Image (spheres, rainbow, N blue to C red):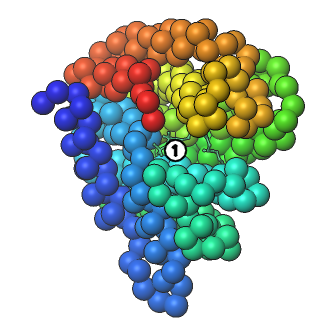
């Protein structure tokens, strides 16, 4: 099987796990379970649960203990997208090629579906305690990482600074802060949780956090590049700035060519560091390399 086929097979496995952990659609509150399913099962690259599983495999993890956490991280990622699309934030009507959750279910249910996914993510992750009571210490540590990296010292903190910086020019230092938290933190938590649940030691978890931090930064710069290219296509204008969002990005800061070179350079550094951990096969390195050239 080549990389693309293996990736597709892994996406299908992840989607089966997500489906298995979704709540039953029942009760007077059934509409919220439907909205959760609508947003969670809308497609997407499934990058975070995939990185989590690959990091788990990297440190010898083999059991299903990782699965509730794989579902949880994608639920948290999906909630952030549902809330980011709301009229009070980016006000987007389309996501992953279909109408956004608040457009289909109304703004009230959009807010509640995001809240529900965030809460249910922790309810889901906690199922790991019943699966493996002997691993309670590692599971508790993994839950701490999940909570912190999704919260005010992670994704929410980054989003706060991002929202507050709209229509202003921010320094490179602040931009790096935003990227590290808004995008990097969930990617870091994905890979760290894989390592922790597989029994990696503190130094190994630190190394994984550094690798994931680089992956997150390269991923967000590539997102800036794709955003500029697609906006320029829509507007029929030359590619030079982030006109849609009116904010500082790596492309407005460094220019398109330097931004592209940085994605390549940071990703290669991450792959080199990964190799020092003796991965069992080439898949994770190939996955990181594929992100440099991603077009969605
Ligand atoms: C609302 C608390 C809160 C946070 C929102 C994730 C986020 C923070 C905003 C979405 C907008 C954005 C560009 C975020 C940066 C991270 C990013 C590139 C998200 C998109 O992730 P992908 O490309 O999405 O993995 P898919 O659809 O493939 O899962």
Q: Do we see residue 228 in this rendering?
A: yes
Q: Name the element at disc 1.
A: helix
Examine the rendered structure and indicate whether residue 50 appears above or below residue 27.
above
Which residue is at 65% across, 42% downward?
A: 155
Q: Tell me where residue 49 appears, x and y as whole percent.
A: 40, 44
Which residue is at 31% across, 65% downward?
A: 20
| Residue at the extreme bottom of the image, as rendered | 28
| In the foreground, 227 or 6 | 227
Asked which quadrant contains residue 163, the reply is top right
Examine the rendered structure and indicate whether residue 151 appears above or below residue 227.
below
Q: Tell me where residue 129 appears, x and y as whole percent.
A: 41, 59
| In the foreground, 57 or 166 | 166
Q: Do we see residue 79 in this rendering?
A: no
| In the foreground, 133 or 31 | 31
Asked which quadrant contains residue 253, the reply is top right
| In the foreground, 94 or 146 | 94
Q: Give the labeled residue for mark 1.
A: 141
Identify the image quadrant of the C terminus: top left
Asked which quadrant contains residue 280, the reply is top left
Q: Label 1: how many residues lie within 10 Å, few (<14), some (14-19) or many (20+)? A: some
Which residue is at 33% across, 63% downward?
A: 19
Q: Tell me where residue 140 appears, x and y as whole percent.
A: 50, 50
Identify the image quadrant of the N terminus: top left
Ligand 1, image quadrant it occupies = top right
Numbered marks: total: 1
Which residue is at 56% across, 32% downward?
A: 233
């Amino acid at each position: 099987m080549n990389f693309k086929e293996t990736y597709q097979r892994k996406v299908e496995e992840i989607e089966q796990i997500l489906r298995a952990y979704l709540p039953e659609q029942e009760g007077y509150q059934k509409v919220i379970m439907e909205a959760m399913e609508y947003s969670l099962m809308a497609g997407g690259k499934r990058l975070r649960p995939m990185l989590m599983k690959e990091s788990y495999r990297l440190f010898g993890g083999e059991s299903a203990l990782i699965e509730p956490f794989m579902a949880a991280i994608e639920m948290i990622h999906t909630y952030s997208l549902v809330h980011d699309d709301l009229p009070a934030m980016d006000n987007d009507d389309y996501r992953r090629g279909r109408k956004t959750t608040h457009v289909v279910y109304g703004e009230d249910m959009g807010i509640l579906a995001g809240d529900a996914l965030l809460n249910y993510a922790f309810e889901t992750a906690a199922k790991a305690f019943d699966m493996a009571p002997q691993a309670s210490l590692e599971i508790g540590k993994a839950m701490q990482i999940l909570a912190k990296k999704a919260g005010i010292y992670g994704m929410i903190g980054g989003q706060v600074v991002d929202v507050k910086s709209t229509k202003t020019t921010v320094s490179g230092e602040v931009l790096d802060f935003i990227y590290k938290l808004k995008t990097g933190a969930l990617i870091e938590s994905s890979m760290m949780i894989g390592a922790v649940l597989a029994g990696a030691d503190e130094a190994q978890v630190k190394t994984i956090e550094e690798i994931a931090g680089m992956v997150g930064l390269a991923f967000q710069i590539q997102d800036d590049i794709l955003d500029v290219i697609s906006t320029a296509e829509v507007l029929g204008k030359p590619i030079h700035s982030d006109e849609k969002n009116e904010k500082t990005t790596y492309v407005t800061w460094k220019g398109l060519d330097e931004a592209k070179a940085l994605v390549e350079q940071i990703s290669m550094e991450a792959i080199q560091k990964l190799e020092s951990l003796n991965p069992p096969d080439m898949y994770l390195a190939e996955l990181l390399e594929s992100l440099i050239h991603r077009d969605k």
